[in-house]
Structure formats: C-alpha cells, structure tokens
Image (cartoon, rainbow, N blue to C red):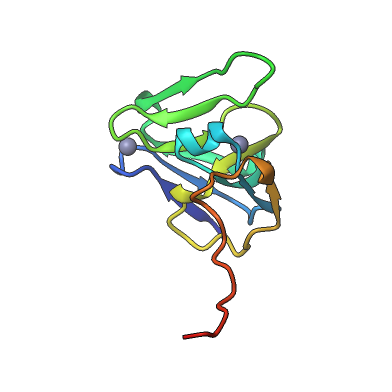
C-alpha cells in the first residue's frame, strides 16, 4: 500500500510506503504562517521522493526553534520536514490519498489564533 502526495502545482511528488503512525495538528504561530499545521509522522525508510527535488527550498528557523520547513519554490506549498530525522513530519495538506488516520493529537493549543476557534455549541435560541 502506498500513499501519494504532491505540492499545489504538482511539480513535487512523493509517496509513503506505510500508513502514518500519528497525525498531529499544531496551532503555533510558525506553522500558521508557514501554511501547514497538520502533519503525518512516518519513518524515514517509508518515504520516497518521486519528482521535483530540484523544486525544494528550505527555511531553517532561529533557535530555539528547530523545525526546518520545506517548500515548493514554484507554488509555495508547505511540505513540512520530509528530510531530517528518523521520523519525518510531512504536511498532511499535501497528501493525495487517504492516510487512513485522523488527528491523534494537538500541539500548542494555547497559541491558537483568536479567529481559529471551534464553533461553540448552538444555544438553540434560533
Ligand atoms: Zn509546487
Ligand atoms: Zn507548529
């Protein structure tokens, strides 16, 4: 079973050879601004580029932040960090196939944007 993914313009393509172990949604301001907040976590051995490595560009933040972000330089799609570590965090936005998993955890919830609140239950007053 493979799960395919690609950037917005289709120039960058990749695949996962196994279902992700986790799917995390991060509410920090850095993820918000970079344009990817939901990530699937897969082992590095289960990830492969199919096309477009020449289109990749990276942003490395100043310490203490360490999460390198990879983008397609043609369309700007935020791909997460598919290049470092034994466990890769890949932007769920870029998946074309169902990863077979839904959100397993949330991070940085106190940093959530004021406009990004869950709808409150209706009071039913009509
Ligand atoms: Zn692209
Ligand atoms: Zn974040």
Visible in this render: residue 81? Answer: no
Please, is residue 17 above or below residue 124 in the view? above
Residue 45 in the image: state x and y as whole percent: 65, 39
Q: Is residue 104 left or right of residue 93?
A: right
Residue 72 in the image: state x and y as whole percent: 37, 31
Q: Residue at x 68, y 28 (%)?
A: 85
As rendered, which of 44 and 29 lies closer to the eye? 29
Please, is residue 1 above or below residue 7 in the view? below
Please, is residue 40 above or below residue 70 in the view? below
Instruction: Specify the quadrant of the image occupied by residue 74.
Output: top left
Q: Residue at x 65, y 22 (%)?
A: 66
Residue 51 in the image: state x and y as whole percent: 38, 36
Instruction: Specify the quadrant of the image occupied by residue 41.
Output: top right
Q: Is residue 117 left or right of residue 42?
A: left
Please, is residue 61 above or below residue 37 in the view? above
Residue 25 in the image: state x and y as whole percent: 62, 49
State the residue lying farthest toward the top: 62
Q: Residue at x 65, y 45 (%)?
A: 42
- Total residue callouts: 0
Visible in this render: residue 92? Answer: yes
User: Where, quadrant-wise, is the N terminus in this rendering?
Assistant: bottom right
Q: Residue at x 43, y 56 (%)?
A: 96
Ligand 1 appears in which quadrant?
top left
């Amino acid at each position: 079973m493979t799960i395919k993914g690609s950037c917005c313009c289709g120039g960058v393509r990749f695949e996962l050879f196994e279902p992700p172990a986790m799917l995390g949604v991060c509410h920090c301001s850095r993820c918000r601004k970079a344009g990817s907040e939901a990530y699937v976590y897969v082992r590095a051995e289960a990830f492969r580029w199919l096309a477009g490595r020449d289109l990749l560009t990276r942003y490395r933040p100043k310490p203490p932040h360490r999460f390198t972000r990879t983008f397609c330089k043609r369309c700007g799609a935020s791909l997460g960090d598919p290049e470092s570590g034994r466990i890769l965090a890949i932007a769920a936005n870029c998946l074309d196939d169902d990863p077979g998993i839904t959100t397993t955890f949330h991070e940085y919830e106190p940093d959530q944007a004021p406009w990004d609140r869950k709808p409150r239950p209706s009071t039913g007053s009509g």
